[in-house]
Amino acid sequence: MTQPQPSTPSHVHAIDLVRVLTFTCVIAVHTVATINSPDSVPAGGAEMLLHFTREAFFALSAFVLTYRHRDRLSVRPFWRRRFWLIGAPYVMWTVIYSGVGLITAPLAPSAALILLGRNLITGAACYHLYFLIVTMQFYVLFPAFRWLLQVTRGWHPWLVAGGAVVQTGINAGLHAAHPSGFAEQLWHFDGSFVGSYLFYLLLGGVAALHVDRVQGWVRAHPIVIVVALALTGAAAEGWYLWSVRGGVPVPIACDVFQAVTVPWCLAVITALFALGVSWAARQGTGLGSQVVKIGSDRSFGVFLVHPMLLLGWMLGPYGWLSAWMPALWSTMLAFAAVVSASLLVVEFLRRSPVSLVLTGKRQLQAEKPVHSGRSEPSVPAEPVRLGAGRM
């Protein structure tokens, strides 16, 4: 007789909307930073608020993994599957972005190979690949992370509160640091280290183990969430403007690692989850629900490809548009164009044999119509399960 296997946890539909909104905002922050001058104060103010995306990424990653494996974890199959699904796209896109870099800055073959090796180790081939580096570090640590959550049951509020205090110290230290020598070289990769996001990983993991209580809390406290969002957002913007007026350069003043960003990121993540919970309670089979579910499934591919299309925009339409269009409108147009083009490219890739290595998702199979001697309705394809999707 075979032993019964634990059932897979039901899918938390709220996460689909959270994923779509977060990836939309990450394209927005990259567009703002690329289109506008580095010393633009309005652009820096927008970046200050949009920089929550990486923190939301890792809270979401911890939530999805912990929720999916809260009852059981087979470590080797977990590592084998996860590293393949994210490792293959990481290697492929590192090669692609490294090759694109050689177009504008050619190198000898030996130097190009050395650069590629360095990029594979550091994630420096493009500014967004740090996310995959950190995610793979978290995969390595996830069994220990899961054990920590299990042995601290009953103490989870204190665990999250302690993580918030430590994270505030981490952010303050990274923001104020001015190292030299070898430490300076390491400091440039502070965003590529999993320890830089301790609080957000704990937040996502604990929320996954108490998902029913968390969903109940956000339903019952919408006013608290809105007020917290407004207050922390005002504090973040006020700190940014005060820093700029004090002579701090805009890129440093809107740095993602600042103590003031911790409460802001917590408020935004909570608000996004509240929106997701509200949407999930009303979702159906309409167009809006289908758009969110499809967008959630394509989100990781869009994340991987959008810097390439943003670069193409800068080399093409941006040159003549920026000459007569205000920066705000130029930014909005670029954002819309990059999002649309990214979705089209990913839709093509998802239906190609290289889907797995370029999008982290298996190739979509075309639905086969049912043929018989009489007229029969076509059988709809089985819905794609999105609970374990990439971010």
Image (cartoon, rainbow, N blue to C red):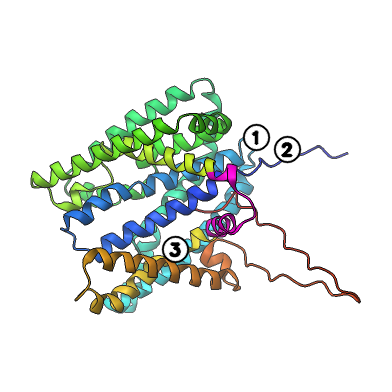
Report the amino acid beneath label 2.
Pro
Residue at 22 percent of width and 48 percent of height = 254
Q: Main secondary structure of the magenta part?
A: helix
- Whether residue 217 can be seen here: yes
Task: Give the residue furthest to the top.
Answer: 154
Of 180 and 95, the residue lying toward us: 95
- Spatial CA span between label 2 and label 1: 7 Å
Q: Secondary structure at mark 2?
A: loop
| Residue 176 x/y as whole percent | 18, 40
Label 2 CA crowd tier, 10 Å (few <14, some 14–19, many 20+): few
Task: Give how far across and how far down residue 48 sits, in percent.
Answer: 26, 48
Ranked by sequence position, the earlier of labels 2 and 1 is 2
Mark 2 in CB contact with mark 1 (< 8 angstroms): yes
Q: Amino acid at mark 3?
A: Leu
Element class at badge 3: helix
Cα separation between marks 1 and 3? 31 Å
Which is more N-terminal, label 2 or label 3? 2
Q: Is residue 8 left or right of residue 338?
A: right
Report the span colored magenta: 279-297
Kindly identify which residue carries mark 3.
Answer: 304
Residue corresponding to mark 2? 6
* Residue 236 point in image, percent of width and height: 25, 40
Q: Residue at x 63, y 44 (%)?
A: 11
Chain-order first, disc 1 or disc 3: 1
Q: Residue at x 34, y 37 (%)?
A: 229
Whether residue 296 appears in magenta in the rendering, the answer is yes
Q: Is residue 44 above or below residue 179?
A: below
- Residue depicted at 29% across the width and 35% down the height: 231
CB under 8 Å between discs 3 and 2: no
